[in-house]
Amino acid sequence: MTPSLPTPVPPREKRPFLLDFFPLETADQTRLSHFFERLKEGIVSTTRCPKDNLLLWPPRTACPQCHGETLEWVDLPERGHLYAFSAVLGGAPLGMESEVPFAVGLVDLEGAPLRLFGRIEGRPWTELHIGQPVRLESYEIGDGRWFYRFRTEI
Ligand SMILES: [Zn+2]
C-alpha cells in the first residue's frame, strides 16, 4: 500500500460531526431549536427557570438546580462590556484556519447577570481593551446555520 497524501480540510457542510464547532440547530436535532430560530431573527436568547428565578447560560432543556424542564425563553440584552479577551494566533478550530488571527473574549452583558464567551469582531485584537463596549449580534455561518458573536461599538 502506498502512503497517501494528507487530505484537504473538508468543506463545512461535509465535516465529521464531532469536529464541527457549531451545533446542529433544527427542532429534530435539538430541543434548543428556539435559540437558533431567535438567532435568525437577530435576537440572542436563553432559558430561565421561573421556579428558581435562575437565568441559565448557555440555554438548557432542564434547570441544573431543580431539574425541572419547565423553562421559559428570555431575550438577552444586546450591549455589554469586554471583561477579558485573547487572540487566536494559531490552532484554530477546523474551518477557521483562514480567519487567524481573531479575538475571542468574555463579555459582561448590561442588565443581565451573565458573562458570555464569544468571538469579538469589529477591531483587530491589538486594538481591544478591557471594558470596551460591544454588542451581541447573530450571523449566518455559511451553511444555513446561525450563531452569535460580539462586535465592538467603537
Ligand atoms: Zn430550577
Image (tube, grey):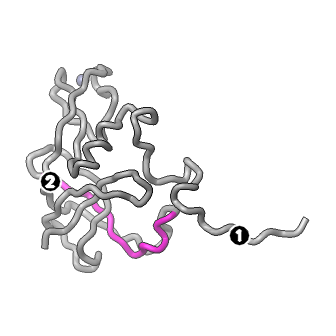
In the displayed structure, would residue 81 be above or below residue 47? Answer: below
**What range is drawn magenta here?**
95-109
Q: At 13% across and 65% down in the image, what residue appears?
A: 133
User: Which residue in the protein does label 1 denote?
Assistant: 6
Q: Is residue 89 left or right of residue 111?
A: right
Q: Looking at the picture, how far across and down is residue 53, in whole percent?
A: 15, 28
Amino acid type, mark 1: Pro
Question: Residue 88 versus residue 73: which sits nearer the camera?
Answer: 73
Q: Looking at the picture, how far across and down is residue 65, in whole percent?
A: 28, 25
Question: Residue 41 versus residue 23: which sits nearer the camera?
Answer: 41
User: Which residue in the protein does label 2 denote?
Assistant: 78
Dot 2: within a 10 Å radius of its alpha carbon, few (fewer than 14), some, or many (20 or more) residues? Answer: some
Residue furthest right as drawn: 1
Q: At 83% across and 69% down in the image, what residue appears?
A: 3
State the separation of the CA atoms marked 2 and 1: 43 Å
Reply yes or no: does residue 100 show up in magenta: yes
Q: Looking at the picture, how far across and down is residue 108, in whole percent?
A: 17, 54
Dot 1: within a 10 Å radius of its alpha carbon, few (fewer than 14), some, or many (20 or more) residues? Answer: few
Element type at marker 2?
Answer: loop
